[in-house]
Image (cartoon, helix red, strand yellow):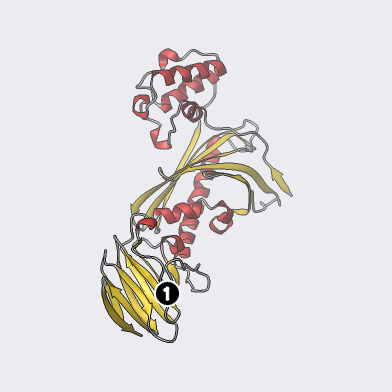
């Protein structure tokens, strides 16, 4: 059987109030003064009005540029007569570039490949920077498969994700923040911060749920780290790699940032039919190593032709114009490798001619 958690969308009161006046806060901003967060006097007046409309208390005189989100939360808790919010925070270090980790954990359709606790994921709706989806757990000891709907909204510029349960079940609310920090080009720290409050009728109180979440998060984060690291080491093949032909030939990048989280370079194969060529181009950030596997070639370095044959290679320095031709009567197969990486993929390759292939 499947148990469905019911409820409506809930975000944290303080976060919702600040977002309503144009300010997004993260877990680490909880003690930051409003003045440093850009919450000016007009914004504070709007927050006061919204709190008064909801709870009936006038707090305008209590809000200053030195007020912090944590202080506002305490004020609201006093007005609402509610217990403090329960919080957890866990992190793990992953031996992979931040962009690769980010792409893996935000691909919710593949969460069953990262998490061991989820039996299925169903995407219900999605946009450019958000997704609404249903998660279903594996059956528990009583044969019940718990299921609920959540929403994620991400900001890649800040490497942060905000998520919350739409169907709340035993929670008064549950909100999560995922943050990612680059420790090295090939190492990332991922942090999960959760804030919630259990309903009085829930089988677990806040303290018990904190313990359960901390225990489960530690296990799942280690599994995710290991699976992402193993995914990087997957063997890549020519047949399963997409072909790029816009510059001539059949070029396939088997090893790269998107394919396997390469942090320092890219490499792959290129195949040219007899008489075919790759148009002239240069790499402003990388040097290129070109190795001939089979066939006969000629590479123009600037305006100097250099003949190459099987088991030979040549270095193409950074910013050197070059074009490659198959001068034989059989297909040419070559290996290319470029390092270091450009700051962004679109900056790594500059075409200096087109056509005439």
Q: Residue at x 51, y 53 (%)?
A: 220
Which residue is nearer to you in this view: 21 or 205?
A: 21
Q: Position of residue 308 (x, y in %)?
A: 32, 82
Q: Which residue is mark 1?
A: 270
Quarter of the image for the C terminus: give it: bottom left
Q: Secondary structure at mark 1?
A: strand
Q: Residue at x 28, y 78 (%)?
A: 305
Q: Residue furthest front?
A: 356
Q: Is residue 217 above or below residue 83?
A: below
Q: Position of residue 316 (x, y in %)?
A: 28, 71
Q: Is residue 224 above or below residue 238?
A: above
Q: Position of residue 38 (x, y in %)?
A: 37, 27
Q: Is residue 219 visible?
A: no
Q: Image quarter for residue 331?
A: bottom left
Count up the numbered dots. 1
Which residue is nearer to you in this view: 127 or 355?
A: 355
Instruction: From the viewer's perspective, tell me whether residue 277 is left or right of residue 154.
Output: left
The local crowd at label 1, few if under 14, some if 14 to 19, many if 20 or more residues have their Cα within 10 Å, is many
Q: Is residue 44 above or below residue 130?
A: above
Q: Is residue 184 visible?
A: yes
Q: Position of residue 216 (x, y in %)?
A: 53, 49
Q: Is residue 100 above or below residue 45?
A: below
Q: Residue furthest right?
A: 1
Q: Residue at x 55, y 20 (%)?
A: 80
């Amino acid at each position: 059987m499947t148990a469905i958690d019911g409820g409506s969308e809930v975000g944290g009161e303080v976060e919702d109030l600040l977002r309503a006046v144009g300010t997004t806060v993260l877990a680490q901003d909880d003690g930051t003064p409003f003045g440093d967060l850009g919450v000016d006097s007009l914004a504070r007046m709007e927050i006061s009005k919204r709190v008064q409309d909801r709870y009936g208390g006038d707090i305008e005189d209590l809000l200053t540029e030195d007020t912090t989100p944590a202080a506002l939360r305490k004020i609201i808790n006093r007005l609402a007569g509610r217990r403090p919010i329960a919080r957890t925070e866990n992190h793990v270090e992953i031996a992979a570039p931040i962009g690769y980790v980010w792409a893996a954990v935000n691909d919710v359709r593949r969460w069953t490949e990262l998490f061991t606790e989820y039996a299925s994921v169903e995407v219900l709706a999605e946009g450019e920077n958000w997704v609404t989806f249903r998660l279903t757990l594996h059956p528990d000891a009583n044969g019940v498969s718990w299921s609920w709907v959540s929403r994620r909204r991400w900001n890649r510029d800040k490497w942060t994700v905000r998520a919350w349960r739409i169907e709340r079940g035993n929670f008064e609310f549950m909100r999560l923040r995922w943050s990612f920090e680059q420790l090295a080009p090939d190492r990332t720290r991922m942090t999960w911060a959760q804030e919630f409050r259990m309903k009085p009728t829930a089988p677990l109180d806040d303290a018990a749920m904190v313990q359960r979440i901390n225990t489960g998060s530690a296990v799942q984060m280690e599994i995710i780290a290991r699976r992402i690291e193993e995914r990087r080491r997957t063997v890549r093949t020519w047949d399963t790699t997409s072909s790029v032909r816009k510059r001539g030939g059949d070029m396939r990048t088997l090893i790269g940032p998107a394919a396997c989280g390469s942090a320092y370079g890219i490499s792959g194969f290129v195949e040219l039919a007899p008489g075919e060529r790759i148009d002239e181009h240069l790499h402003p950030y990388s040097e290129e190593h070109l190795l001939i596997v089979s066939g006969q070639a000629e590479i123009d370095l600037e305006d100097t032709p250099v003949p190459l044959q099987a088991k030979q290679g040549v270095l193409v320095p950074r910013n050197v114009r070059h074009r490659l031709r198959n001068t034989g009567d059989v297909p040419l197969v070559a290996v290319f490798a470029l390092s270091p990486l450009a700051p962004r993929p679109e900056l790594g390759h500059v075409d200096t001619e087109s056509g005439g292939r």
